Image (cartoon, coloured by chain):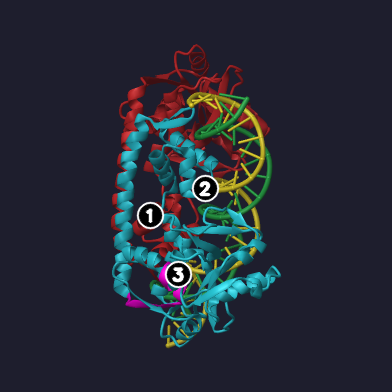
Chain colours: A cyan, B red, C green, D yellow
Amino acid sequence: MFDFKLQVFQSVASRLSFSKAAEDLHITQPAVTRHIRQMEAHFNQKLFKRKGNSIALTEAGKLLLSHSKLIFQQYEKAEFDMNSLIDKNEGSLRIAASTTIAQYILPEVLAKFHQKFPKIKIHLLNMNTEKVEKSVMNNSVELGFIEGQSKNRELAYQAFLEDEIVLVVDKSHPLAKKNQISISALQDVPLVLREKGSGTREVILKAFQHENLKVEALNIELELGSSESIKSYLANGHSGSFLSINTVLKELKHGDFYIVDIEELQIKRDFFFIQQQGHHSKLNSVFLKFLQHHYNF
Amino acid sequence: MFDFKLQVFQSVASRLSFSKAAEDLHITQPAVTRHIRQMEAHFNQKLFKRKGNSIALTEAGKLLLSHSKLIFQQYEKAEFDMNSLIDKNEGSLRIAASTTIAQYILPEVLAKFHQKFPKIKIHLLNMNTEKVEKSVMNNSVELGFIEGQSKNRELAYQAFLEDEIVLVVDKSHPLAKKNQISISALQDVPLVLREKGSGTREVILKAFQHENLKVEALNIELELGSSESIKSYLANGHSGSFLSINTVLKELKHGDFYIVDIEELQIKRDFFFIQQQGHHSKLNSVFLKFLQHHYNF
DNA sequence: AACATTATAATCAAAAGTAATAATAAAGAT
DNA sequence: ATCTTTATTATTACTTTTGATTATAATGTT
C-alpha cells in the first residue's frame, strides 16, 4: 500500500537481487539501488552484504525484514477493514461484456476483485457489442466492456487493455516450431476464421487490406461461430486460425498451441470499457479504480 | 518514520484541524489538504466530515486511525530494534564543547539522543574554544562544538544552529515591558558584560562597531566571567546585559527576564560543530545525523 | 576475457511543497 | 434578522524536491 521504500527492501530481500527486485516492481535497477542506499543511511548500517555477483542480508537486514513483514501485515489488515466499510454502503454492480472479454479477460479480474471486496455482488452478463452499448445506455447495467471503439456520443469510452490477434496452430501442426513465416507463405496455410460479422474477423480483414493482401488469396477452410469451437477444431486438424492472444493464453502456456509470427504483420486492437457520460456511481468507480490498478492504465 | 501520508492523517485526526496539523508537521495547509484528499481517494471514502469551521472523523476515519496507530507501533518497534543493533557495534563518543553550548544547548539534545540510543555512552567535556579545537585535532575527542567559526585547515566546520545575542533585563527592570528602545537610548542603560576575551563579548563589540557605536559610549557597570554570574546579577539589579538568547530561554519562558529589542541592531552568530577533515567514525555520523534531524540543517 | 551484477552520473518526469486567494460556514455586531 | 468579521478548508498557479530513467562505469565470478 503506502511506504514504497519498505516494499522495495522486502522485494530485494526476498529475491536477493537488486535487478530482479527492480523487474518485479516495474522500476529500474538504479532506482532500487538508491532506495536501499537511503534506507541504509536511515538506519546507519548496511542492510545487504554486496559480494560481487550476489548479495546477502546482513544481520540488520534480517532484523528489518522480520519487522517489515509485521508492518505490512498491519497495512493489509487496515486495507481489508477499510474495504469492508465500503461494501456496507452500497449494493451490487451489473456489468455487460462482449464474448471474448466476458470469457477470457474478466473472470480473472473479477476473482481478484471479489477477494478484495468480498461483499460486493457482481452480475456479469454476456452479449454482443451492440447490446452491451444498449444495456449501458438504458441503464440496465452500469458498466460495459467491448472489443473495439465505436462512436456513441452518450457513452464514455476508455481503453484498458491492448489485445493482439495472432496466427495460432496446434502443437502437431507443421508450422508449430517455426518462429516466423512470410505473408505470402500464409496463403498455403489452411485457415479457420470466425463467422462473418464477428468483431474479431473484421479486425483481421482490415489488417489484411492494410497490407494489400486480398482475402480471396487466403486459404479459408472453414468458418466457425466462436473461439472455443475454433480451438477444438485446431486441436485435431492441420489448419491455423487468427485468434486473440488472450483466448489462448492457457494453451500457449501448456504448449498445446503455438504462435506463428508473420513477417511485417501485427494485428492489434484495444479493449474498452464504457459507461454513461457523467454517470459514476460509487461502486462503479471503486471497480474501475481496481481495474486501472490491475492493468496499470 | 516512513509513510508521511499516514503521519499527516494521524496528525489531522488528533488535532482535528488541517491547519493545526500543518503547523505541527512544518508544512502548509494546502499540502495537508492534498494528502488527505489522496488518502480519501485511495480508500474510496471520506475520512473527515467537513462542517464549516471544524472537521470530525467519519466512521472510516476512526477505523483508519485505530489501524494507523498499530502501524506506527510496528514502525517504532522496528526503529528501536534497528537502533539497538547499532549500539552493539561500537563504543562511546567523546565530545568537547565550549561553555555556552555545553551548558545550554547540548544537554537537551543529548537527553533525546540517549533515549533513542540507550546504550551509546557519551562523554561531554567543557572547555574554551581554543582547547576544543586542539582536542579535536589531537583526537582526544571525536567531535567539538564552538560558538564561532575560525579557520583551522585541519578541521571541518559546520554551522548547526543560529544564535542571537539580545539585551536582557530582569522583570523588575524599568525597561522590562518596553518592546523596543533606540540605539542611543541604550547608552543610559547600565550594562553587565562578559569579561574581555570572551567569544560572546567579541561578537557584541563587533556588532557595535558595525553600527558605528563606540564601546566607550556604553554604560558598562561590571564585567563578569560567565553567563550564570551575569544572570544572578541581573536578578537583583537595575542593569541589563547582552546574552545569548539560548542561555536565558527558561527565564524568558517563566517571565523572570525580558528581552528589550534595540532598533536596527541584531546580533547574530552561528554555532558550529567541528571534526577532523575526513575523520568520520560510525557513531560520529550517527550522532551528527541525529543532530541534523533535530535542528533541521 | 566474458558475463552478470551493482554503482554512478546526467537528465527528465513526477510528486510534494508554497504563496496567494477564493469559498464557506460560524460567530458577533448593528 | 442581516451584515460584517473571523476562522477554516479548497483551489490554482508556480517552484522545489524527489524519484525514475538512460547510459555507462566499476567490480567481482565463471
Answer above or below: position of A103 versus B145: below
**Mark earlier in primary sequence (3, 2):** 2
Residue for point 35% across, 38% down: A64
Q: Which residue is mark 1?
A: B11
Gap in angstroms between the C-alphas marked 3 and 2: 42 Å
Q: Residue A7 location in percent, x, y? A: 41, 46
Q: Are marks 3 and 2 in contact (CB under 8 Å)?
A: no
Which amino acid does the dot numbered 3 rest on?
Tyr
Tell me if I can see residue B172 in this picture: no
User: Crowdedness of circle 3 by 10 Å Cα count: few (<14), some, many (20+)?
Assistant: some
Count every numbered label the image shows and give the total: 3
Is disc 1 placed on a helix, strand or loop?
helix
Is disc 3 placed on a helix, strand or loop?
helix
Q: Which residue is mark 2?
A: A27
Q: Nearer the viewer, residue B221 or B294?
A: B294
State which chain disc 1 sits on: B
Residue B279 belongs to magenta span: no
Q: Nearer the viewer, residue B172 or B156?
A: B156
- Residue B97: name its quadrant: top left
Which amino acid does the dot numbered 1 rest on?
Ser
Q: Which residue is mark 3?
A: A233
Residues drawn in magenta: A90-104
Q: Nearer the viewer, residue A210 or B281?
A: A210
Answer above or below: position of A225 versus B123: below
Residue A94 belongs to magenta span: yes
User: Crowdedness of circle 1 by 10 Å Cα count: few (<14), some, many (20+)?
Assistant: many
Gap in angstroms between the C-alphas marked 1 and 3: 64 Å
State which chain disc 3 sits on: A
